[in-house]
Amino acid sequence: MIKTVISCIGAVALILFAIIQTDQLAMFFGDFFSPFFVFLGGVFMAFSVSAHRESLLIERLEAFRTGCTLSGAMGTLIGLVAIMANMDNPKMIGPALALALLTLFWAAYFNYLAKLVIISKSSVG
């Protein structure tokens, strides 16, 4: 358990360090839609797993990862459609592209954290 917590904190610190180095901290944490969209997609998928499974936590974490990936892909497609819809207005292309890429970022981030927990839980049992 301690190893998992340290791994998760290390991953968060590494990603936060990379964000700070680009001087874009406000962009990543000023956008609340992208992380919630991806996280809720993963949560909804995780609760769709039947409770009668032998390894319920691992199954739910795998479903969470799948849901995050699908939500990230959907957010990217929504952002790309917004880009195409606003080709005549260059000021709207930037926010739409940010939405597309930030949903991918948050999907990869939540996938990584869930995988760390899965690895730690599967090595214990």
Image (cartoon, helix red, strand yellow):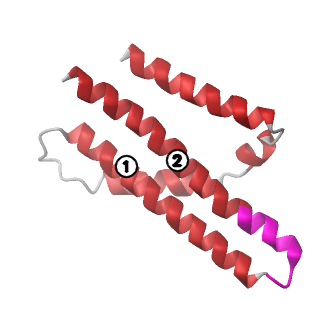
Q: State which tag comes first along the sequence, 1 or 2.
A: 1
Sort mark 2 into few (<14), some (14-19) or many (20+) by Cα contacts within 10 Å.
Answer: some
**Figure quadrant of residue 124:** top left
Residue position marked by numbered label 2 in the rendering: 108
Quadrant where the C terminus is found in the figure? top left
Range of magenta residues: 87-97
Residue position marked by numbered label 1 in the rendering: 64
Q: Secondary structure at mark 2?
A: helix
Q: Secondary structure at mark 1?
A: helix
- Please give the name of the residue rendered at 45% of the width and 44% of the height, measured from the top-left corner: 111
Instruction: Please state which of residues 36 and 3 is positioned toward the viewer in this rendering.
Output: 3
- Please give the name of the residue rendered at 44% of the width and 62% of the height, measured from the top-left corner: 70
Residue 122 placed where, x, y %?
24, 29
Amino acid residing under circle 2: Ala
Look at discs 1 and 2 and give the one toward the viewer: 2
Residue 105 placed where, x, y %?
60, 50
Q: Main secondary structure of the magenta part?
A: helix
Residue 28 placed where, x, y %?
72, 46
In the rendered image, residue 93 lying in the magenta stretch gets the answer: yes
- Please give the name of the residue rendered at 78% of the width and 39% of the height, measured from the top-left corner: 25
**Figure quadrant of residue 12:** top right
| Residue 42 falls left or right of residue 99 | left
Amino acid residing under circle 1: Phe
- Please give the name of the residue rendered at 72% of the width and 76% of the height, measured from the top-left corner: 83
Sort mark 1 into few (<14), some (14-19) or many (20+) by Cα contacts within 10 Å.
Answer: many
**Figure quadrant of residue 26:** top right
| Residue 10 falls left or right of residue 114 | right
